[in-house]
Amino acid sequence: MIVDVLLILLAYLAGSVSTAIVVCRLLGLPDPRTLGSRNPGATNVLRLGGRKAAALTLAGDFLKGTLPVLLVLLLGRDPATAALAGLAAFSGHLYPVFFGFVGGKGVATGLGVLLAWSWPALLATVATWLAVAGLFRISSLAALTAFALAPVYLWILGENQALLPAMGLITLAIFWRHRSNIRNLLDGKEKRIGVKKPDETE
């Protein structure tokens, strides 16, 4: 029990390392919480620092979701601990203790957690994102659709039942963090991939 608690705490601390802020500091870029969308995530870092900075941010956000859960599984802990560790890493990204509890929207970290839980479910979720993004050219709509179906993919694949409520909570959190995007979608104002708004902050 103590080992499980420590692993879950470690997962939260790993998730709390804001890759966007660290990358921007290392590359001499502005704090992503102060410019652009003010979201410390790969999309805003792309706007502020280009593809290299965004790729580093994306990779870091993804891995901090995957590695803590893999550690739990490698140590032979039960699926419930793996589920809680994934939730902890994801929560750390959303509410990082090291950065004033101001985090990103969780898409990359959520996908990283899903990889550790079930790589087939991850493939299905990514395929959904690509299909919706290719059809509608709206990144937020693709992410919301993909995460809405992620619990369904876990269920279809017959993964451990402990993962289903955990994935459901991640999905709900993704929708909550994208509430402004959802409003824009309903109003027909959400930005399309590759289309730059005239008044967009550089």
Image (cartoon, rainbow, N blue to C red):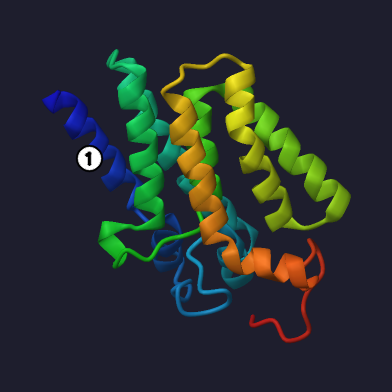
Residue at left 28%, top 17%? 77
Q: Is residue 26 left or right of residue 75?
A: right
Comparing 177 with 59, the one in front is 177
Residue at left 32%, top 52%? 16
Residue at left 16%, top 25%? 3
Q: Residue furthest right?
A: 135
Do we see residue 150 in this rendering? yes
Position in image of residue 172 (x %, y %): 52, 48
Position in image of residue 112 (x %, y %): 50, 37
Do we see residue 59 in this rendering? no
Position in image of residue 85 (x %, y %): 33, 33
Question: SS of the residue at dot 1?
Answer: helix
Position in image of residue 74 (x %, y %): 33, 16
Q: Quadrant of residue 67?
A: top left
Q: Quadrant of residue 180?
A: bottom right
Position above or below: 29 against 63? below
Amino acid beneath label 1:
Leu
Q: Quadrant of residue 87?
A: top left
Quarter the C terminus occupies: bottom right
Q: Is residue 198 left or right of residue 150?
A: right
- Disc 1 crowd rating (10 Å Cα; few below 14, some 14-19, many 20+) is some
Position above or below: 99 against 7? below
Q: Residue furthest bottom?
A: 199
Q: Residue furthest left?
A: 2
Can you identify the residue that label 1 sits on?
9
